[in-house]
Image (cartoon, grey):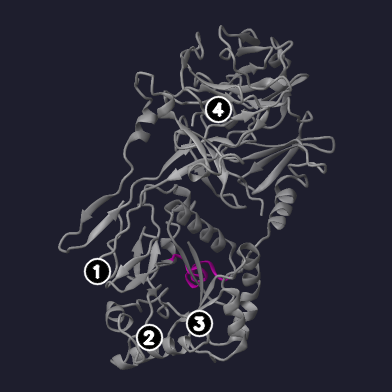
Amino acid sequence: MVVLAVDDMREAPKYETFLRPILDRLKKIDGRASVSIMTNKIDPTLPRLQDWLKEGVSLEVHSIDHPCPYFNSGDFPKAKSTYDRCVELMSAIPGNHPVAFRMPCCDSLNTPSPRFWEEIFNKTTEHGRFLTMDSSVFNITTPNDPSLPRELVIDPDGRQKFKKFVPFESFVNTIEDYPYPYVIGKLCWEMPCVTPSDWQAQNINKPMNPSTVADMKSAIDVTVLKRGGFFLVYHPHGWIASNFLSFRECQERIDKNMLGGQSIRAEDGRDNGVRLIDLNNDGFIDVVIGNDKLKQTRLWSPKTNSWIVGDFPVVIDAKTHFGIVTSSGNVSLIKPDAAFTFDGEKWIEEKALLAGLDGVPFEAVRLRDLNNDGRCELIVGSPTQSAVFEYHPGERRWIKLPFSLPEGTSIVDANGHDAGLRFVDVNEDGFDDVLFSNETGSSLHLFVSMQKGWDKKVEIGIAPAISRNGTNNGAWIHSRGLWVANENTDKLPNLVDRKYFNDMMASVEPTARSPQASLKSLPSTGALMESSGSSRWAIIPSALTEKARPAAACAISKIPTATASTTNPRSSSTASVIPTACSPGKKACSSLPRRTSFMPRTLTATARPTKSKNSSPASSRVIPSIA
């Protein structure tokens, strides 16, 4: 969940000017403007308030007098009065139902207190009114959480990304690594604020610094990974920009800044010959463009944050394939009439990469690393031709191996359309198996060796069709199963058809799993640790597990996505105000062997990792900045 809560309202016109672009954008996205305004003092009869309420805004409580510190001068009744009067005022606005409070100055001073929650918040006003939520404690995400990618919690200079925003000599209004609501004193939901607030950010970065937005995007990514809450504290004082983009604006920025003025789709909607590839294995995505209007290589330079533009030799079409096929580890491209290898700066023609492929239908070709040696084999699968080739550097030609695709399977049908074959490691031994399913039937063939290929057929019964009459039937691999969703599955449980790998393998005697598969089998549960000297319990969240979804085809531009799951037990304690801080797929030529593929998190150079089985944690592929 994401809550935008702007503080300190006393004047409606100022907030209308500041919030209007945000409200309008939110309405376009979700049909309503879900913003909370933490209010000090306002005329409850103002028409503007009614307009906001109709748009989805909530008007919440921030104390009448905004005292910093909240408790002062030994005057407890004054502290209670400024809260009670604000609750009454917000409740007096027709149609408004306040539920939340935020302590003034809580992002820089130790203003929250257990006394406030127990003796003021958890009581009622003179007229019996009360709130149910507070958002005054700050959660700091730290490197102690092993489930988070390091680039989300550590800056390039080695500093903690979020702790840098609380450089105060004493600031104890925090918890760590717990972005979840919890209960204080049985009656108050604490919604921990995200670090940084806009004040904390401008205090370190100065106002309107792009670094602030980048750090907040990282905080959002952490929230998504942890499946928690992002409760933002911000103000209408020009400390951060309200930067919202439409999809059209995103598209325009991608085309202009990343793709050199091109688009991934041509004017007629067809393939425009644009591919995203890490050409030089530096961990950053590069771009190649090959169409009738432009042939260009765009190499991203992280040192200069700019593109190095060079030539590209061919027009890219459906018969153009990219992969690593030589021992150099460099990316090569092959198509029926051309073959080139990128040497780190330019494309070098290599006609030898076509030797031995006479008569091969390139529309039926896939490049995949079958034996995990870091080089792709070339697989041919059509109704009339089935073969597997390995490039032999000594002979400088492709050599046909003694096996082919299993009988009755093919990559494409007679029309060159999807026949329903997927390379998936079903038995989790580290090697791609062949799963085949269409309107005519289904089969599973396990990989045995580079001499026998997919020589072990498994009877799996009826499986959901991957393709149907040459069309995509809505199939994907997820959570160790084949899933299908289409116009015919709406009456099935959860609106999907499925067949789990365990069911497919029911007739097969279990064998030893690969080390990677064994690790994934370990239970992903949290642990309870009793805090010494108290009855409180700290929840230690389990590590995040990421499973790569196998690539369906060997086009490097198709970067595998991933599914991430995590177990985060949530705990509330009646004995404490603030919880104890928490302590701490198969590689394919399409994803470039021995490298990690990154999917872009935002339109920036940072990204969330999708780790392949055979890549080291230090390796990565990042989408360069396109903003």
Q: Does the magenta stretch include residue 534?
A: no
| Residue 303, numbered label | none
Neighbourhood count class around disc 1 (C-alpha, 10 Å): few under 14, some 14–19, many 20 upward = some
Eyeballing the image, is 382 above or below 462? Answer: above
Q: Which of 47 and 373 is in front in this view?
A: 47
Residue visible at 51% across and 87% down in the picture: 93
Q: Which is nearer the N-term, disc 3 or disc 2?
A: 3
Q: Is residue 618 something that shows in the picture? A: no
Residue 259: name its quadrant: top right
* Percent coordinates x, y for residue 98 in the rendering: 45, 80
Q: Mark 3 points at which residue?
A: 96
Residue 334 picture quarter = top right
Tag 1 secondary structure: loop
Q: Which of marks 1 and 2 is nearer the N terminus?
A: 2
State the separation of the CA atoms marked 3 and 1: 31 Å
The CA distance from mark 3 to mark 2 is 13 Å
The answer to whether one can see residue 605 in this image is yes
